[in-house]
Image: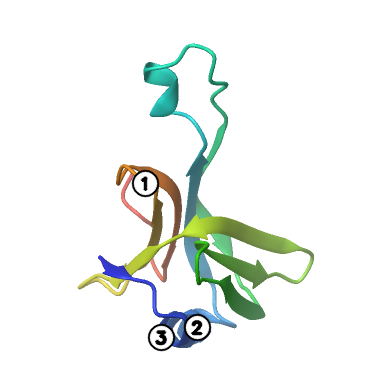
Amino acid sequence: MELINQETVQQHLEEYQGQPVYLHVETTNGAYASHFDKQVFNAGTFLRNIQVTYVQAKITGGGKEPFRIGLKLEGGWVYVQGLTHYEITENGEFLLAGHNFQGQLAAALEISRTPFPL
């Protein structure tokens, strides 16, 4: 995976705009930390193969902070914060990930024209 380049990622987001796509969204604030500290409260989200058509996509942030991506739907938003890296797979899947300071996964947003494997 490569470090996010805001302009490049914005262009890739727009390639999927206006067409049905499948999303994988995953976030966690403590799955890794809680193994070492029983005082840490683990919370997270996991969604896979949610089909949406987004009408607008926007990446913001960067600098000293990780990036945020918002996908505007007809009736709401999908929003993922904490993204640091991206790649396009051979199958055309657009993968975005946020890694914590130890390199562990903290957030993921994946977009595909076909369902992700289960």
Q: Nearer the viewer, mark 2 or mark 1?
A: 1
Q: Nearer the viewer, mark 1 or mark 3?
A: 1
**Mark 1 closeness class: few <14, some 14–19, many ≥20 residues within 10 Å:** few
The color scheme shown is: rainbow
Residue 8: image location, x then y, percent? 40, 86
Instruction: Answer with mark 1 or mark 3, whichever residue precedes in sequence.
Output: 3
Q: Is residue 53 visible?
A: yes
CB atoms of marks 1 and 3 within 8 Å:
no
**Mark 3 closeness class: few <14, some 14–19, many ≥20 residues within 10 Å:** few
Image point (58%, 70%), residue name: 61
Inter-mark Cα distance, 3 to 2: 5 Å
Q: Amino acid at mark 1?
A: Phe
Callout 1 secondary element: loop
Q: Quadrant of residue 116?
A: bottom left
Residue 113 to residue 27: above or below? below
Pointer 3 residue: 8
Q: Amino acid at mark 2?
A: Gln
Inter-mark Cα distance, 1 to 3: 24 Å
Residue 26: image location, x then y, percent? 48, 46
CB atoms of marks 3 and 2 within 8 Å:
yes
CB atoms of marks 2 and 1 within 8 Å:
no
Image point (43%, 80%), residue name: 9
Image point (63%, 68%), residue name: 70
Inter-mark Cα distance, 2 to 1: 24 Å
Residue 101 image label: 1
Pointer 2 residue: 10
Q: Amino acid at mark 3?
A: Thr
| Nearer the observer, 6 or 101 | 101
